Image (cartoon, coloured by chain):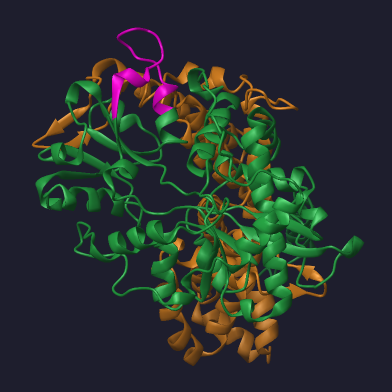
Chain colours: A green, B orange
Amino acid sequence: MKRPRFGRTALAAIGAAAAVVLAACSTTPAGQQASGGATTAAGGLQPVTLQLQWFTQGQFAGYLAAIDQGYYREKGLDVRIKEGGVDIVPQTVLAQGQADYAIAWVPKALASREQGAAITDVAQIFQRSGTRQVAFADKGITQPGQFAGKKIGNWGFGNEFELFAGMTKAGLKPSDVTLVQQQFDMQALLSGEIDAAQAMSYNEYAQVLEAQNPATGQLYQPSDFTVVDWNTDGTAMLQDAIWASTDKLSDPAYQDRTVRFVAASIKGWAYCRDNVAACRDIVVKAGSKLGASHQLWQVNEVNKLIWPSPAAGAGTIDPAAWAQTVNVARTAVNADGQTVLTKDPDPEAYSNDYVTKAIDMLKGEGVDVVGTSYQPETVTLNPGGN
Amino acid sequence: MGSTRRLRSAASAVAAFVLLVVLWELAKLVLPDAGVTVGGTRILPRTDDAAMPHVWTVLARLGAPEVAGAAEPRAVGAAIASGALFTLGLALGGLVLGGIAGVLLAVLMQRFAVAEKAVLPYVIASQTVPLIAIAPLVAGWGGKIAIGGWAWEPWASVMVISSYLAFFPISVGMLRGLTSPREADVEMFRSLAAGWWTTLVRLRLPASVPHLVPAVRLAAAAAVVGAIVAEISTGTRGGIGRLIIEYAQSATGDPSQMYAAILGAAVLGLVAAGAVGLLELALRRYRGSVA
């Protein structure tokens, strides 16, 4: 009988495979180097990590601009951005201490807070909701009451509560409509599988307007659609806010860092208000895969959600809007019979202390923090967003 | 494996691809644009260009610029190729990690019957936990780890998740292989006063090769799937999984770019399977060496 040994050839093959892997590992793209947990970095800057909700795109232009324009650096911060993913929950990442700050929608973050995540809203960047329900004009859907008997798209996963609040307000139950789970794209609306589809004004709505209308051979026009806007319906909820760790906020050093971080972020957003095209370029440079005209649209639409800001300044949490958000979160019942919150959040859920100091800081620098005279641009979308 | 046989298997792989293309185009040609729906339930997908682009549209897309207006424009094909390479590296890393874990587990389970009884149910149960539940956990734990000044990088989470899928077929296949020698052979080793280690190295490991190779092939495919899903789940930049979802975001008007990325992922799977073929070649002499 032959007695083979598990020989050198095999070991060499395994070794070679391991070498390939190691070589692959060292090709980490630039800009992803961790800043580590140290409290100081090169040049005396404090490392700060910011967790986003999604991939780099115009929705986060202000933070990217604050990095690009050196606003964080001016405030002694070395900010590293962590992009989101399908299963990354920013407020959880923040609560676990994996990031210093996180961008998250208020209702979703409050739901996490109710389950024990110690996080505080320290700046309400988006003052208005970007969620819309879009339908073809010939369907005659201009208000939530007309959803009855229609196929209504929604993303679920906590993104659907404004829709259910609007329907409840209009006297409809979830069972009065046919709910359809939406994908990332808007094909289902265009093909008629959904009568009214959920869309963010800055993203999915633009996708529809970047698609070709087979009837005309041209791109779809805004006049082809009707849009239900939850802001005017009174059931809107607050969205992108900067969240900080509640526990760490008892530390004066973190308080100070929070003020500087919020100030530089708002300065970044003010830059994007006044330099829409430059911000588009910053976002494209940061690695977004969405086309340039789509990105310009996105920055412009996001500006509309921020500016003009309350008289107290951008990022200020408006108690009335907060109360409306909490009210919807407590009363709107989704198809599973759930509400976002079961009780009112405690007073520590938000604080205007830091943003107020940040606004004072920016006023001292002569930054326009209200944008009273803000006028949105008119963006022409190209096919496919290019 | 003879060269004719290798040629034949390559030819059949090409034929299978052509068949797929023909089927795709045939479906577009024959089936109605709106698909087939029976009693409100869709049984066949929509086949219009917005849902199923022509194969040539997808291929043509590979040459188009990826992001209009980018400072350093690159073609979609180049982006997909570099993403696929990145993912391949992570999947191979996951395969090696998973392979080491799987083999060690199998040896442990072969050596100690009590270990097999204790561990095997958990090995099987591990595969019933959905990946999307594990991915954020791994990313979360990983962020707390720093090994000797090296801080955990997002790609490391992807590699670990990929290895989580890869170790399973290897541990099960390896265990089968290690226990495959005939009782007579094992007893002969014992009669020659060969210890456990000698029996392992000279009898059990060579005997396990015919079981190991198909297991590694399964594991390689699982590692690629794991890496792609983990990239999507954790949003790790640089790989093909992230590209698929980013392209999918702008698929409303023209999904061909997304399909181009999916095509890239499929090619990636084939390359990974091909790499296992190399391993098979290296271990060829052990095939059937212990009957």
The stretch in magenta equals A207-226
The x, y position of residue B277, in whole percent, is 62, 47
Tell me which residue sits at (81%, 54%) in the image.
Answer: A73
Looking at the magenta stretch, what is its main secondary structure? loop
| Residue B90 found in image quarter | bottom right
Relative to B168, is B220 above or below? above
Task: Locate the C terminus of chain A by quadrant.
Answer: top right
Q: Is residue B9 visible in the rendered structure shown here?
A: no
Relative to A116, is B73 above or below? above
- Foreground of the two, A115 or A214: A115
Tell me which residue sits at (29%, 63%) in the image.
Answer: A327
Relative to A40, is B277 above or below? above
- Along the horizontal axis of the image, is B121 left or right of A142? right
- Along the horizontal axis of the image, is A369 left or right of A205? right
| Residue A140 found in image quarter | top left
Tell me which residue sits at (72%, 61%) in the image.
Answer: A260
Tell me which residue sits at (11%, 50%) in the image.
Answer: A171
Q: Is residue A264 visible in the rendered structure shown here?
A: yes
- Foreground of the two, B275 or A19: A19
Asked whether A185 falls inside the magenta stretch, the response is no
| Residue A197 found in image quarter | top left
- Foreground of the two, B288 or A358: A358
The x, y position of residue A180, in whole percent, is 23, 43
The x, y position of residue B88, in whole percent, is 64, 47
Asked whether A222 falls inside the magenta stretch, the response is yes
The x, y position of residue B280, in whole percent, is 63, 52
Task: Locate the N terminus of chain A by quadrant.
Answer: bottom right
The single residue placed furthest to the top in the displayed view is A216
- Foreground of the two, B32 or A240: A240
The single residue placed furthest to the right in the displayed view is A43
Q: In the rendered picture of this protein, how many numbered marks are placed on residues?
A: 0
- Along the horizontal axis of the image, is A242 left or right of A271? left
